[in-house]
Amino acid sequence: MFSGRCQCGAIHYEAQGEPAYSALCHCSDCRKSAGAPMVGWALFPEEQVTVTGRPAAYRSSDNVTREFCGTCGTGLFYRNAAVFPGMIDIQTGTLDDQSNLPPAIHVQFAEAAPWMEGAHQLPKFQRYPEV
């Protein structure tokens, strides 16, 4: 079982079984909705996901609904009945245990930020470096 929540804790979820995939999405819609260079997703059948609380919903494009916490704004779910009927994508950044669903693939990489290819070569700091 996988569990997670929004930042303020108003919305909790649990997912049973294994996801169809765990991916990092680079599409412009995901980047804009999250304000991040990519978003992690894990796709589950809707009947295997239980949500406690009431997420707000935003129809971001044809057939696509993105759900988020209306209190703290945390993005949580993605639904697209045309592409993924009966499925729900969960933002993996909201998992209680980040080690549970590591990404296995990159998707929509054609839309990735132009600097993404070299991102892993950037200097790494365990905490914020002194300025």
Image (cartoon, rainbow, N blue to C red):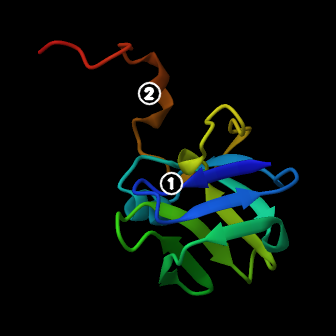
Say if 35 sits above or below 47 in the image. above
What residue do we see at 37% from left, 65% from top? Answer: 73
Q: Which mark is residue 111?
A: 1
Q: Residues within 10 Å of mark 1 (few under 14, many from 20)?
A: few
What residue do we see at 54% from left, 63% from top? Answer: 76
* Relative image position of residue 5 (x, y in whole percent): 54, 55
Q: Nearer the viewer, residue 93 or 23?
A: 93
User: Which amino acid type is shown beneath numbered disc 1?
Assistant: Glu
The outermost residue toward the left is 131
Which residue matches tag 2? Answer: 119
Horizontal placement of 119 versus 91: left or right? left
Quarter of the figure with residue 70:
bottom left
Q: CA distance from mark 2 to mark 1?
A: 15 Å
Query: SS at mark 2?
Result: helix
* Relative image position of residue 61 (x, y in whole percent): 51, 82
* Relative image position of residue 24 (x, y in whole percent): 61, 46
Q: Nearer the viewer, mark 2 or mark 1?
A: 2
What residue do we see at 51% from left, 54% from top? Answer: 111
Q: Quadrant of the C terminus?
A: top left
Horizontal placement of 98 versus 38: left or right? right
User: Which amino acid type is shown beneath numbered disc 2?
Assistant: Ala
What residue do we see at 74% from left, 38% from top? Answer: 104
Q: Which mark is residue 90?
A: none
Quarter of the figure with residue 100:
top right
Query: SS at mark 1?
Result: helix
Say if 26 sits above or below 48 in the image. above
- The mark nearer the N terminus, 2 or 1, is 1
Q: Residues within 10 Å of mark 2 (few under 14, many from 20)?
A: few
